Protein backbone atom coordinates (compact mmCIF):
# COMPACT_ATOMS: atom_id res chain seq x y z
CA UNK A 1 0.00 0.00 0.00
CA UNK A 2 1.35 3.37 -0.99
CA UNK A 3 0.18 6.89 -0.33
CA UNK A 4 -0.76 7.42 -3.97
CA UNK A 5 -3.12 4.37 -3.90
CA UNK A 6 -5.15 5.59 -0.92
CA UNK A 7 -8.59 7.12 -1.58
CA UNK A 8 -10.15 9.86 0.43
CA UNK A 9 -13.09 8.79 2.61
CA UNK A 10 -16.09 10.77 1.42
CA UNK A 11 -19.70 10.70 2.55
CA UNK A 12 -22.42 11.07 0.00
CA UNK A 13 -23.94 14.51 0.31
CA UNK A 14 -27.57 14.70 1.52
CA UNK A 15 -29.76 16.05 -1.28
CA UNK A 16 -31.90 18.87 0.02
CA UNK A 17 -35.37 18.88 -1.48
CA UNK A 18 -37.57 21.75 -2.53
CA UNK A 19 -34.76 24.05 -3.59
CA UNK A 20 -34.91 25.77 -6.98
CA UNK A 21 -36.47 24.72 -10.27
CA UNK A 22 -34.27 21.70 -10.94
CA UNK A 23 -35.89 18.74 -12.64
CA UNK A 24 -35.36 16.23 -9.83
CA UNK A 25 -35.93 17.72 -6.33
CA UNK A 26 -37.66 21.03 -6.94
CA UNK A 27 -41.30 22.12 -6.95
CA UNK A 28 -43.24 19.04 -5.76
CA UNK A 29 -39.98 17.46 -4.51
CA UNK A 30 -40.77 13.89 -5.48
CA UNK A 31 -44.21 13.93 -3.83
CA UNK A 32 -46.23 13.83 -7.04
CA UNK A 33 -49.31 15.99 -7.45
CA UNK A 34 -51.82 17.41 -5.00
CA UNK A 35 -53.86 15.70 -2.34
CA UNK A 36 -53.31 13.76 0.87
CA UNK A 37 -50.01 12.19 -0.19
CA UNK A 38 -48.50 15.57 -1.08
CA UNK A 39 -48.94 16.91 2.46
CA UNK A 40 -46.41 16.79 5.27
CA UNK A 41 -46.96 13.94 7.70
CA UNK A 42 -49.44 12.26 5.40
CA UNK A 43 -50.77 8.89 6.39
CA UNK A 44 -53.25 6.81 4.43
CA UNK A 45 -56.16 5.80 6.67
CA UNK A 46 -55.80 2.15 7.71
CA UNK A 47 -58.57 -0.06 6.35
CA UNK A 48 -58.65 -2.19 9.50
CA UNK A 49 -59.66 0.85 11.57
CA UNK A 50 -62.63 1.43 9.27
CA UNK A 51 -63.70 -2.19 9.70
CA UNK A 52 -63.45 -1.92 13.51
CA UNK A 53 -65.45 1.33 13.54
CA UNK A 54 -68.28 -0.31 11.57
CA UNK A 55 -68.81 -2.95 14.31
CA UNK A 56 -71.64 -1.96 16.67
CA UNK A 57 -70.72 -0.88 20.18
CA UNK A 58 -72.16 -3.23 22.74
CA UNK A 59 -72.46 -2.91 26.48
CA UNK A 60 -70.57 -5.07 28.94
CA UNK A 61 -67.26 -6.84 29.22
CA UNK A 62 -65.46 -7.37 25.92
CA UNK A 63 -68.12 -5.66 23.75
CA UNK A 64 -68.62 -8.36 21.09
CA UNK A 65 -67.60 -11.22 23.38
CA UNK A 66 -70.96 -12.97 23.31
CA UNK A 67 -70.86 -13.27 19.53
CA UNK A 68 -67.69 -15.33 19.51
CA UNK A 69 -68.41 -17.38 22.64
CA UNK A 70 -71.89 -18.52 21.60
CA UNK A 71 -71.09 -18.97 17.90
CA UNK A 72 -69.35 -22.32 18.38
CA UNK A 73 -71.75 -23.75 20.98
CA UNK A 74 -73.67 -26.75 19.69
CA UNK A 75 -77.40 -26.78 20.44
CA UNK A 76 -79.20 -29.85 21.77
CA UNK A 77 -81.46 -31.73 19.37
CA UNK A 78 -84.96 -32.38 20.82
CA UNK A 79 -86.01 -36.05 21.03
CA UNK A 80 -89.59 -36.82 22.12
CA UNK A 81 -90.39 -39.90 24.23
CA UNK A 82 -92.58 -41.29 21.43
CA UNK A 83 -89.46 -41.46 19.20
CA UNK A 84 -87.70 -43.59 21.85
CA UNK A 85 -90.81 -45.77 22.14
CA UNK A 86 -90.81 -46.40 18.38
CA UNK A 87 -87.07 -47.02 17.83
CA UNK A 88 -85.81 -48.84 20.95
CA UNK A 89 -86.71 -52.20 22.48
CA UNK A 90 -87.09 -52.74 26.24
CA UNK A 91 -83.83 -52.89 28.19
CA UNK A 92 -81.67 -51.14 25.57
CA UNK A 93 -79.21 -48.29 26.19
CA UNK A 94 -80.05 -44.86 24.78
CA UNK A 95 -77.09 -42.57 24.07
CA UNK A 96 -76.29 -39.91 21.43
CA UNK A 97 -74.33 -42.55 19.47
CA UNK A 98 -77.23 -45.04 19.40
CA UNK A 99 -79.70 -42.26 18.57
CA UNK A 100 -77.51 -41.22 15.60
CA UNK A 101 -77.20 -44.85 14.40
CA UNK A 102 -80.98 -45.13 14.22
CA UNK A 103 -81.33 -41.68 12.53
CA UNK A 104 -83.23 -40.11 15.42
CA UNK A 105 -80.69 -37.28 15.72
CA UNK A 106 -78.36 -35.93 13.00
CA UNK A 107 -74.57 -36.01 12.93
CA UNK A 108 -72.72 -32.71 13.34
CA UNK A 109 -69.19 -32.52 11.85
CA UNK A 110 -68.66 -36.28 12.20
CA UNK A 111 -70.10 -36.56 15.74
CA UNK A 112 -73.65 -37.14 16.97
CA UNK A 113 -75.38 -33.96 18.14
CA UNK A 114 -76.24 -33.40 21.79
CA UNK A 115 -79.69 -34.80 22.51
CA UNK A 116 -82.35 -33.62 24.95
CA UNK A 117 -85.16 -36.03 25.67
CA UNK A 118 -88.49 -34.25 26.05
CA UNK A 119 -91.66 -35.54 27.70
CA UNK A 120 -93.83 -35.54 24.57
CA UNK A 121 -95.76 -38.80 24.30
CA UNK A 122 -95.80 -41.86 26.55
CA UNK A 123 -93.12 -44.42 27.37
CA UNK A 124 -93.91 -48.02 28.35
CA UNK A 125 -90.48 -49.63 27.85
CA UNK A 126 -87.68 -49.84 30.42
CA UNK A 127 -84.71 -47.92 28.93
CA UNK A 128 -81.37 -46.74 30.36
CA UNK A 129 -80.40 -43.26 29.19
CA UNK A 130 -76.72 -42.25 29.15
CA UNK A 131 -75.11 -38.99 28.03
CA UNK A 132 -78.36 -37.20 27.15
CA UNK A 133 -80.06 -34.21 28.73
CA UNK A 134 -83.53 -35.00 30.06
CA UNK A 135 -86.43 -32.67 30.84
CA UNK A 136 -88.36 -32.94 34.14
CA UNK A 137 -91.48 -34.43 32.55
CA UNK A 138 -89.40 -36.96 30.57
CA UNK A 139 -87.45 -37.92 33.72
CA UNK A 140 -90.65 -38.75 35.60
CA UNK A 141 -92.03 -40.76 32.63
CA UNK A 142 -88.76 -42.76 32.24
CA UNK A 143 -88.52 -43.53 35.96
CA UNK A 144 -92.24 -44.44 36.03
CA UNK A 145 -91.60 -47.00 33.25
CA UNK A 146 -88.70 -48.47 35.29
CA UNK A 147 -85.85 -46.92 33.31
CA UNK A 148 -82.64 -45.29 34.57
CA UNK A 149 -80.88 -42.01 33.74
CA UNK A 150 -77.11 -41.79 34.08
Image (tube, rainbow, N blue to C red):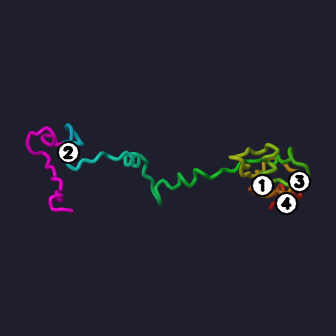
Point out which mark residue 39 bears.
2
User: What distance separates the C-alpha of mark 1 from that of mark 3?
Assistant: 21 Å
User: What distance separates the C-alpha of mark 4 from that of mark 1?
Assistant: 14 Å
Residue topped by disc 3: 92
The residue positioned 79% from the left and 44% from the top of the image is 104
Q: Is residue 50 magenta?
A: no
User: Which is nearer the N-term, disc 4 or disc 2?
Assistant: 2
User: Which is nearer the N-term, disc 4 or disc 1?
Assistant: 1
Residue topped by disc 4: 148
The residues colored magenta run 1-29
Residue topped by disc 1: 137
Give coordinates of residue 2: x percent, y percent: 18, 62
Please tell me how crowded label 2 is: few (under 14), some (14-19), or many (20+) other residues with Cα within 10 Å. few
Quadrant of the image containing the C terminus: bottom right
Which residue is farthest left? Answer: 20
Give coordinates of residue 90: x percent, y percent: 91, 52
Amino acid sequence: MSLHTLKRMTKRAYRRVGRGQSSTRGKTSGRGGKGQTARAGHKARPELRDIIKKLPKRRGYGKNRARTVNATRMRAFPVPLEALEATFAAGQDVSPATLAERNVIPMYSGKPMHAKILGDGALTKKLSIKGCMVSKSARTAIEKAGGTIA
